[in-house]
Image (cartoon, rainbow, N blue to C red):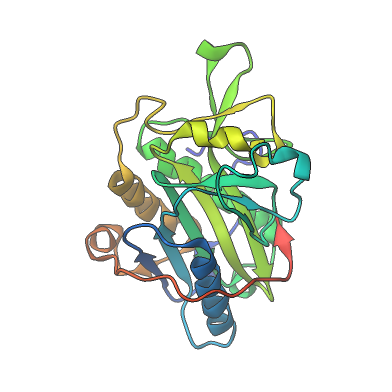
Amino acid sequence: MVKSDLFDKNFLDPAAAGGQTRWHRSPGLADYPGALAAMEERVADIRAGRERELVWLLEHPPLYTAGTSAQSRDLLQPMRFPVHVAGRGGQYTYHGPGQRVVYLMLDLSRRGRDVRAFVRTIEAWLIDALARLGVEGGCRAGRTGIWVARPAKGEGREDKIAAIGIRVRRWVSYHGVSINVAPDLSHFAGIVPCGISDQGVTSLADLGCPADMAALDAALLATFPRHFGAIEPSSPAEAARLLPQSASMAQRSPNDGAVA
């Protein structure tokens, strides 16, 4: 059973999605401008019916991104890492090695055209995937992302393990989520992550969870069909073995409607 204090059911009917969603996993560290350009092109192709939906798994080199709600005061160390204007919803966040970034290019015109429901379904999916790894995460009213209780750090203390920031262009989503597997958590000190200063950040490694990137990918694959419909290849086990490799592309800047 998915644990959350904001929902108690699946918000999107997987059967309504139709077709199959392709998955790609990029090796190494993908440069951020190239990733934005790749998403831009894929979103246009999905909208035009030239390509299928895509879930893209990758890692970035150390950098900070500013969402559409970012406040300059929350960039505490502007010279520490490159800062990119992301165009997604949300505020400042960090990307770097040891963090799984998942870009979701999905057609919401076939998924109910309900952006809030879409975000809640993303939350449910991440909570499901983390549960398979023995981590109990949840979402909280007024705070985006997935949170883990840390009572040993103090009463009411919670740390964020996954961030969510999407954009929707003509009912096709892009950007997506980031999940901390084993990044250098000290890198988050250069920003106020997502504008929240009274809670912290954590990772699977920080929680003592032995799961690595491959284990997280397998958990994401295994739980995706429940929330979003079939993937390609035809089963999570097959996909875990056969995820194709993809490369980032040349620079281009995104625009249009963002959602935190």
The reply to whether residue 38 is in sight is: yes
Q: Residue at x 69, y 24 (%)?
A: 198
Q: Residue at x 64, y 72 (%)?
A: 253
Quadrant housing residue 215: top left
The x and y percentages for residue 254 are: 65, 71
Instruction: Answer left or right for 211 relative to 53.
Output: left
The x and y percentages for residue 249 are: 46, 75
Q: Residue at x 67, y 67 (%)?
A: 168
Q: Residue at x 69, y 41 (%)?
A: 75
Residue 61 or 40: which is nearer the viewer? 61
Compared with residue 183, is residue 15 higher up or lower down, i.e. above or below? below
Quadrant housing residue 114: bottom right
The x and y percentages for residue 85 are: 66, 59
The x and y percentages for residue 163 are: 57, 44
Instruction: Answer left or right for 206 relative to 173.
Output: left
Q: Residue furthest front?
A: 79
The reply to whether residue 10 is in sight is: no
Compared with residue 132, is residue 165 higher up or lower down, i.e. above or below? below
Q: How many marks?
A: 0
Residue 27 or 224: which is nearer the viewer? 27
Residue 248 or 102: which is nearer the viewer? 248
Compared with residue 94, is residue 239 higher up or lower down, i.e. above or below? below
Compared with residue 117, is residue 256 higher up or lower down, i.e. above or below? below
